[in-house]
Every structure is written in structure tokens, then in C-alpha cells.
Amino acid sequence: MPEQCDPRPYDALLLLSFGGPEGPDDVVPFLENVTRGRGIPRERLKEVGQHYFLFGGVSPINAQNRSLLDALRKDFADHGLDLPVYWGNRNWAPYLTDTLRAMVRDGHRRIATLATSAYASYSGCRQYRENLADALATLKAEGLAVPQVDKLRHYFNHPGFVRPMVDGVLASLAALPEDVRDGAHLAFTTHSIPAAAADTSGTPADHTTDGAGGAYVAQHLDVARVIADAVREETGVDHPWRLVYQSRSGAPHIPWLEPDICDHLEEQHRQGVPAVVMAPIGFVSDHMEVKYDLDTEATAKAAELGLPVARSATVGADPRFAASVRDLLLERAATERGLDPRRCALGALGASHDLCPVGCCPARAPRPAAAGADWTAPVAP
Ligand SMILES: CC1=C(CCC(=O)O)c2cc3nc(cc4[nH]c(cc5[nH]c(cc1n2)c(C)c5CCC(=O)O)c(CCC(=O)O)c4C)C(CCC(=O)O)=C3C
Ligand SMILES: [Fe+2]
């Protein structure tokens, strides 16, 4: 087998995602799953429920994961990589625990997992590792073999993730009226998180104490800069840009990352900026946050202001992204075999760590988290 196509020691890939409701009856139980123990105000939950009902109670995320699964299977088959791909979610069917149980029953013992979240943060990384730890503990309690699950590294700066977003921004610029195109500013958006969670995102060495936002903000700024530079190279126009936030929840008195995209659009309009491209670099696909918070709410705000906006595409099931997943998997497989593979990364930060060290993206209340340096696998009985 050629080295670049050797998945050993892995015998399967698990796509690990958030999950979302598939109809009106699913919305409330889904939101209960998401917010269990998270202290989200009731009012906020009612409001977010309305976002889902506006779309028939169907989150776009599951269809997008099914497309990504198809793209991964096609990419693997086209490149002679014979590795089954499974899918499990944190908050809705197919649930992670059920998928892992099926994987073990199918004989898989060494599993690589890709989370549909590209950046470091508690919500985007450690919480998935906690869910893995819970699922593995359940398998153990059921008397099943406990597989080893490795989480593939953060891919925010992988070319297969970044290049489709560059194309997306170029397409959005092209879609703006010609007379405002060259003057357009770029608003890179991501999920707001509590400022305290941002400051403790990433490894302890990445943590900040001055509200600078830790690895979460640093990684987004790095990607934004790479995209803005690539867009300038392509168009010959230097579009000013800023990283802004969306989808804030939580109590108003707790600081979250700011500014919000809607406030930012108002500010840009006040300053006479003629048009804005909203580029949701924090999201792997067109989640409800993109469909509602950007395409519905922020777009309505822009219309009210008379500010032309365009929203650029997320990566979704782009074949270049599927290829980057293959690259990440084969890279990690080679590392696990003791080789020193090339680790693709754009920008200034370099390739992220394979194994989250102790203290990476800590939780408010410490809980076991799998696939990191502080994890001891439960031993099968
Ligand atoms: C960083 C981040 C990502 C990106 C990384 C990743 O992709 O994982 C993400 C993704 C997602 N978040 C999602 C949905 C929700 N997130 C919520 C709540 C929260 N998210 C947070 C952060 C993040 N969330 C935080 C700090 C909270 C507060 C509660 C808490 O501290 O845990 C709530 C509760 C209501 C509300 O408060 O909004 C919902 C319904 C969906 C599904 C969308 C769909 O259906 O298409 C997806 C992909
Ligand atoms: Fe969220």
C-alpha cells in the first residue's frame, strides 16, 4: 500500500457533529438536549425555538452532514482509501453513543474522529471530547469493548477549508452591485462565546487574561487575514475587514465576544461604507445560525439601513474539504505509526496539536474528556 494512502492504525472514521431537529416535534426536545445544565435563559430558548419553527422545525445541519458523508465516501473511494465512515451527533439522532456502539459491533477498535467545528473552544472542542468520554463510559457499562478514539486536529487553517471560503468571498463580491463592489468591507463572522471561555480557549499557553480571546480569537483572525490577503491578490482591491460575532446567547450581564454583526452593520453604514460581505468563517456549513442570524436577521437589518450585503458560502460538502479530511486522517495515521508527515496549514499559526494537553479549553466544572492528554480510557470488563 502506498504510504500516502495507509490509514493504519485506524479502521474507521467518525464524523462527529452537533445534530439538529428534523421536524416541529423535535424542536423542544432538541433544545433541551443542547441546553441541559448550560444555564440559558428561558426567553432565549423560546426565541431560538422560533428560528427553527420559521424553517418548519428542520435544522439544515443534518442534510449538510449527509452531503458531507457522501462527499467523504466519494473522496475516499476515488483515492483508494478503504475506510468506512460513520456519523454521530451530540444533540440529536443519530446519537454519538448509538453510532459508537454500532461501530464496536462492526468490529472497529481504533477510530479517528472529525468534529464539524474547525476552531478551539470549549463548545467546539472539549465539549465534544466530554461527549466521547460519556459515550465510551456507556459502552463499558454495557460490557462492550471500548475503542480508542482519536480526534483529528483543528483544521481552521487547512487549505481545503480556507480556499473554498476565499472563492465564496470572491463570489459574494461579484454578486454586489458594481458601483459598490470595490468599496465593500468584509465582515468575517463567528459564533460569539463568553469572553471568559474565549480567554481560556486553546492550550494553557494560548490563554489570555486581557480579553484578547485566547486561541479562539487568534485562530479566527489568522484565517480572516489569509482570506483577505487572497482576495486582495485575486481582485487587486484591498477590502478592509473585521472579525465580528453572531448568535450570542446567555445572560446579558455576562460579557460575550463583540461586536455583534447587526451592530457592526449599523456602524459600517454610519461610517459610509457602501457594502459589506458577511463571511461566516466560524461555521463549517450553513447551520441555523447562518440561515437565521445572517440570512434572515442581519440581512433584514442591512435592508432597513439600505446597505447592500452579500453572504458568502460556507465550506459544506466542497470536494476540497473532503480531500482535506482525508489528508488530516492520513497525516494523523502516519504520525501514530511513528512517521513525521507533512502537516498542511496556511497562515501564521501553523498546524494545531494532535492531542489536547491538560488544561485545553477547560470546562467551568471539570468532567472527563476523551481523546486528550488527560484521558484514561475505561478498560473493557
Ligand atoms: C462555538 C460554537 C459553535 C461552533 C462550533 C460547532 O459547530 O460546534 C456552535 C455551534 C452550534 N450551535 C448550535 C445550536 C445551538 N447552540 C446553542 C448555544 C450555544 N452555542 C455556543 C457556542 C457554539 N455553538 C454557546 C457558547 C452556547 C451557549 C450555551 C452553552 O454554553 O453551551 C443553542 C441554545 C440556544 C442558544 O442559546 O442559542 C443552540 C440551539 C448548532 C446547531 C445549528 C443548527 O441547528 O443548524 C451548532 C452547529
Ligand atoms: Fe451553539
Image: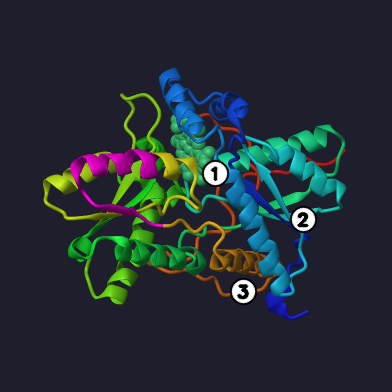
Q: Which residue is mark 3?
A: 340
Disc 3 crowd rating (10 Å Cα; few below 14, some 14-19, many 20+) is few
**Which residue range is magenta in the image?**
293-312
Q: Please tell me in which quadrant of the rendered image residue 299 appears.
A: top left
Question: Viewer-nearest of labels 3 and 2?
Answer: 2
Q: CA distance from mark 1 to mark 2?
A: 30 Å
Residue placed farthest to the top in the image? 42
For mark 2, give the secondary structure: strand
Q: For residue 12: magenta?
A: no
Q: CA distance from mark 3 to mark 2?
A: 20 Å
* Sequence order check, earlier mark of 1 and 2: 1
Left or right: 238 as drawn, with respect to 120:
left
Q: Quadrant of the N terminus?
A: bottom right
At a point 70% along the width and 63% down the height, the residue shown is 73
- Amino acid marked by disc 2: Arg
For mark 3, give the secondary structure: loop
Percent across and percent down for residue 45 are 46, 24
Residue 191 appears in the figure:
no
* Sequence order check, earlier mark of 1 and 3: 1
Left or right: 131 as drawn, with respect to 41:
right
Q: Quadrant of the C terminus?
A: top right
Q: Which residue is mark 2?
A: 110
Q: Which residue is mark 1?
A: 60
Disc 2 crowd rating (10 Å Cα; few below 14, some 14-19, many 20+) is some
